[in-house]
Image (cartoon, rainbow, N blue to C red):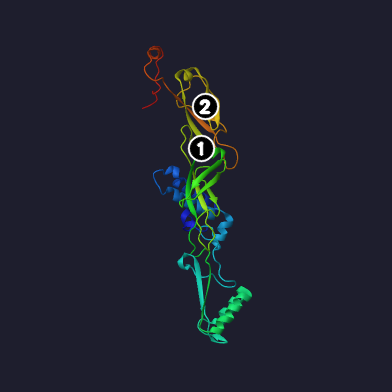
Amino acid sequence: MRDPYEVLGVQRNASAAAIKSAYRKLAKKHHPDNNKNDPKAAARFSEVNSANEIVGDEDKRKQFDRGEIDAEGKPRFQGFPGGGAGPRGAPGGGFEQYSFRTGGGPGGGGAGGGAAFEDILNSMFAGAAAGGGRGARGGRGGSQTFEFDGGGFGAPDLDVNVTMTVSLEEAVKGGEKRVRLPNGKELNVKIPAGVTSGQQIRLKGQGETVQGHRPGDLLIAITIAPHPVFKVDGDDLRVDLPITLYEAVLGGKVRVPVVGGAVELTVPKNTSSGRTFRLKGKGLPKSGGGSGDQFVTTRIMLPDGNDAELEALMQKWRDDHPYNPRSGMA
């Protein structure tokens, strides 16, 4: 993954508030719900989330700045004890190889400085390396190769990014859903109650595996499927409520759907189409506790087909009570 500072478009000395602000803007810009015709939006959105997991976390940011972890949060190889970091770029993308040649006189000084290097190995691997070193000196001119996991340097990207679409009810109440990975593997994923569209679920060790490296992680970007009744607006829900002409004129109690049930809403007399009511606490769960609200907008619906009695009534009303609701418009 790219440098997380570069992904978020902030300087390395940026404040935590600036990083948070940049993350929110990019998350909104690249959210899959706002880019339904862009197949690459989910990948960009996931990259923004991964970058924020590093520099948006105080401890991880310090580790990254010190070079202890890479842009994916994986530990970097710090080199031999007492020495600097090893060379980058493991051959074949897996293990790094370090070779030395023994030879020369008993005092060392042959090709590659054999004796001195063996002393380093003796200090590193205790008696085991020491035994191997003696055998090398006896054979003269031999070559020994040690392999070890390169860690962050040259290590392949083993994380797997997928998108999971959940229903509004699953997002609110939580549950369990099966996800299929690109390699054909299937997993049951626990969906936490109150999950929001754009939230990322990380399953440690469920990504790709390569011998010599720790398994990657599975990163699941959540999207909430469109609902036939409710429209998600942050932590709030919005719903259009059809009402009859006589309910709008005379008022009355009307049942309104909410997630998981219904409540009764009192429609006042002379309610115009487009009037909005708020049902407090009937929205989505908030991350900090509590819930958003549900906003209900009335839509006056006339009966299908021609109704002679209604037409006659409206004609009489027009003649006896004329008014122009558009009088204030240019």
Residue 168: assigned label: 1
In the rendered image, residue 76, in percent from the top left (x then y), is placed at 54, 64
> Does dot 2 land on a helix, a strand or a loop?
strand
- Residue depth check, mark 1 versus mark 2: number of the one nearer the observer: 1
Q: Can residue 18 be seen in this view?
A: no
Q: Residues within 10 Å of mark 2 (few under 14, many from 20)?
A: some
**In the rendered image of this protein, does residue 31 appear above or below residue 256?**
below
**In the rendered image of this protein, does residue 112 appear above or below residue 195?**
below
Toward the right, the furthest residue is 127
Q: Residue at horizontal 50%, vertical 29%?
A: 296
Q: Residue at horizontal 51%, vertical 73%?
A: 98
In the rendered image, residue 251, in percent from the top left (x then y), is placed at 51, 19
Indicate the amino acid at tag 1: Leu
In the rendered image, residue 121, in percent from the top left (x then y), is placed at 58, 76
Choose between 12 and 66: the one closer to the eye. 66
Mark 2 = which residue?
Answer: 256
